């Protein structure tokens, strides 16, 4: 098995820059290969998707959360995407990892808002379905579900389900991105969809492309958007490609590989 090494701990002062770049390319090639995440199941928890959009390809399934008599469940969904947010995120994942298997779970309504209890019910369903990757470009500030979400993300971590969640765009406390069992994502301003940057000052761990990104939008259109919401599916797509090459990896290994691939480490070398 190949030994993963962190460039910033194995390279000393004066090490040729070309060798550093070659090492990073080698790490990335080993990590993501030349495949597209074939067979990796990804659940996009968001506002739904426009299944007909040419940039999305075929979804495996589409579901939505529903409330009946005070309890929450999950039903098949043909309602599309009332806001475009989920379509944009799913399209980014498809572009980065074109061979992954996408499933949509709609938890947001037409105003891009939803219930904290409904969000928890949807995420619990996704964990129970054992999706290797759950992409979450939203968060909640509702303290009533904080503890339950914390326990759920810990359960997922131990069961081989990786949450990849967007950090809030504003400096507020929200969840689940702040939990240590979750891979948290912010934005960098480069256009390379495979560029990963690591953050030396968590709780945000990694940065993905999230500034002026052209994305799929409902009714066959596109739109240019910015925000951590759109950086997160870039990191999810990269993780899908990693799992396509290394299906035995879990959250811990994905974190290590993302760090090895990080393009901003070179500037931090001694």
Image (cartoon, rainbow, N blue to C red):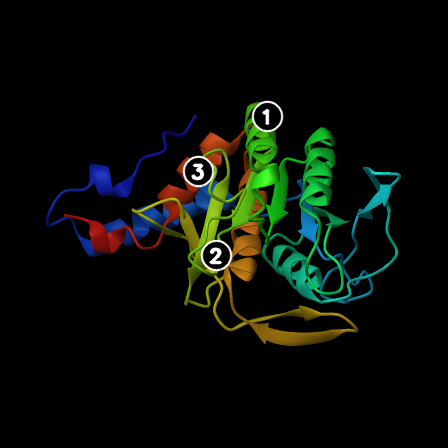
Marks 1/3: CA–CA distance: 17 Å
Determine the secondary structure under disc 2.
loop
What residue did someone put label 2 on?
Answer: 194
| Number of on-image labels | 3
Q: Extreme left residue here?
A: 14
- Counting from the top left corner in percent of width and height, residue 189 is at 41, 67
Residue 244 located left or right of residue 183: right
Structural crowding at the residue carrying mark 1, measured as other residues with C-alpha within 10 Å and reported as few (<14), some (14–19) or many (≥20): some
The label number, if any, that marks residue 155 in the structure image: 1
Q: Which of these two is toward me, 225 or 20?
A: 225
State if disc 3 and disc 1 touch (CB < 8 Å).
no
Residue 97 located left or right of residue 179: right
Figure quadrant of the N terminus: top left
In this rendering, the answer to whether 24 lies above or below 129 is below
N-terminal-most mark, 1 or 3: 1
- Counting from the top left corner in percent of width and height, residue 157 is at 55, 28
Picture residue at 47% right of the left edge, 69% below the top: 211
N-terminal-most mark, 2 or 1: 1
Marks 3/2: CA–CA distance: 15 Å
- Counting from the top left corner in percent of width and height, residue 255 is at 44, 38
What residue did someone put label 3 on?
Answer: 255
Which quadrant of the structure image shows residue 27? top left
- Counting from the top left corner in percent of width and height, residue 132 is at 63, 35
**Residue 39 visible to an observer of this rendering:** no
Q: Nearer the viewer, mark 2 or mark 1?
A: 1
């Amino acid at each position: 098995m190949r030994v993963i090494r962190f460039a910033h701990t194995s390279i000393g002062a004066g090490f040729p820059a070309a060798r550093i770049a070659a090492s990073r390319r080698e790490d990335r090639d080993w990590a993501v290969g030349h495949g597209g995440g074939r067979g990796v199941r990804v659940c996009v928890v968001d506002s739904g998707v426009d299944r007909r959009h040419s940039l999305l390809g075929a979804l495996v399934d589409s579901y939505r959360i529903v409330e009946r008599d005070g309890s929450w469940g999950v039903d098949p969904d043909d309602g599309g995407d009332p806001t475009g947010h989920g379509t944009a995120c799913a399209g980014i994942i498809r572009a980065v990892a074109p061979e992954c298997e996408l499933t949509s779970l709609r938890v947001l309504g037409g105003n891009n808002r939803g219930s904290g209890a409904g969000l928890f019910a949807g995420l619990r369903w996704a964990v129970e379905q054992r999706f290797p990757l759950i992409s979450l470009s939203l968060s909640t500030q509702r303290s009533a579900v904080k503890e339950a979400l914390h326990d759920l993300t810990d359960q997922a971590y131990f069961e081989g389900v990786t949450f990849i969640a967007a950090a809030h765009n504003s400096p507020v406390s929200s969840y689940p991105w702040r939990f240590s069992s979750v891979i948290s994502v912010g934005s960098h301003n480069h256009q390379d969809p495979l560029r990963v940057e690591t953050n030396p000052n968590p709780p945000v761990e990694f940065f993905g492309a999230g500034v002026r990104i052209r994305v799929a939008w409902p009714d066959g259109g596109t739109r240019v958007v910015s925000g951590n919401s759109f950086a997160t599916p870039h990191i999810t797509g990269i993780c899908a490609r990693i799992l396509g090459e290394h299906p035995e990896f879990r959250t811990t290994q994905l974190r290590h590989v993302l760090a090895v691939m990080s393009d901003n480490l070179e500037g931090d070398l001694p």
